[in-house]
Image (cartoon, grey):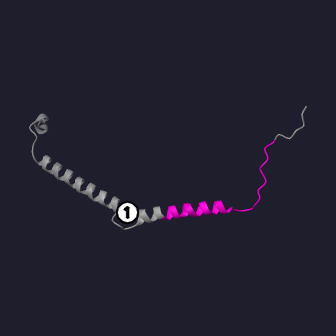
C-alpha cells in the first residue's frame, strides 16, 4: 500500500491580506458601481431615472386614452352585440 499524501494542499502565499492587484480591481469595480448608481439616480435628461419617467408618462397617457375610448364605447350600443335586456325578459 502506498502511504503518499495525496490530499490537496494550498500554495503558500507570499503576502497576507489583499494584494495590490486585488485592491486595484476592487477600486475599479467600485468606480464602475458609482458611475452606474449616478446614472440610475441622476436627474439628468439622459439618466435611466429620467427615461423611466418619460416611459411612465407615455403609459399613463395611453391608459387615459384607453379609458376614454372605453367610456365612449360603453355609452353607444353596439349593433353587433345582443341586447341583453331583452333576452332575459
Residue occupied by mark 1: 47
Q: In the image shown, does 57 or 10 lie closer to the viewer?
A: 10
Residue 78, picture quadrant: top left
Q: In this view, does 4 lie above or below 39?
A: above
Residue 89 visible, this angle = no
Position of residue 25 in the picture relative to residue 5 (left or right): left
Position of residue 12 in the picture relative to residue 48 (left or right): right
Q: Which residue is drawn at 75% across and 62% down?
A: 16
Q: Residue at x 82, y 40 (%)?
A: 6
Position of residue 40 in the picture relative to residue 15 (left or right): left
Which quadrant, please, contains the C terminus?
Answer: top left
Q: In this view, does 47 lie above or below 82?
A: below
Q: Residue at x 44, y 66 (%)?
A: 38
Position of residue 77 in the picture relative to residue 35 (left or right): left
Q: In the image shown, does 83 or 58 lie closer to the viewer?
A: 58
Q: In this view, does 38 lie above or below 8?
A: below
Which quadrant, please, contains the N terminus?
Answer: top right
Residue 83, picture quadrant: top left
Q: Position of residue 69 (x, y in %)?
A: 16, 50
- The span picked out in magenta is 7-34
Q: In the image shown, does 12 or 37 lie closer to the viewer?
A: 12
Amino acid at each position: 500500500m502506498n502511504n503518499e499524501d495525496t490530499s490537496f494542499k494550498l500554495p503558500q502565499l507570499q503576502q497576507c491580506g489583499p494584494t495590490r492587484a486585488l485592491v486595484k480591481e476592487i477600486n475599479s469595480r467600485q468606480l464602475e458601481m458609482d458611475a452606474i448608481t449616478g446614472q440610475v439616480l441622476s436627474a439628468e435628461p439622459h439618466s435611466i431615472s429620467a427615461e423611466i419617467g418619460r416611459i411612465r408618462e407615455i403609459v399613463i397617457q395611453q391608459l387615459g386614452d384607453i379609458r376614454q375610448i372605453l367610456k365612449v364605447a360603453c355609452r353607444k350600443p353596439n349593433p353587433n352585440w345582443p341586447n341583453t335586456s331583452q333576452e332575459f325578459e
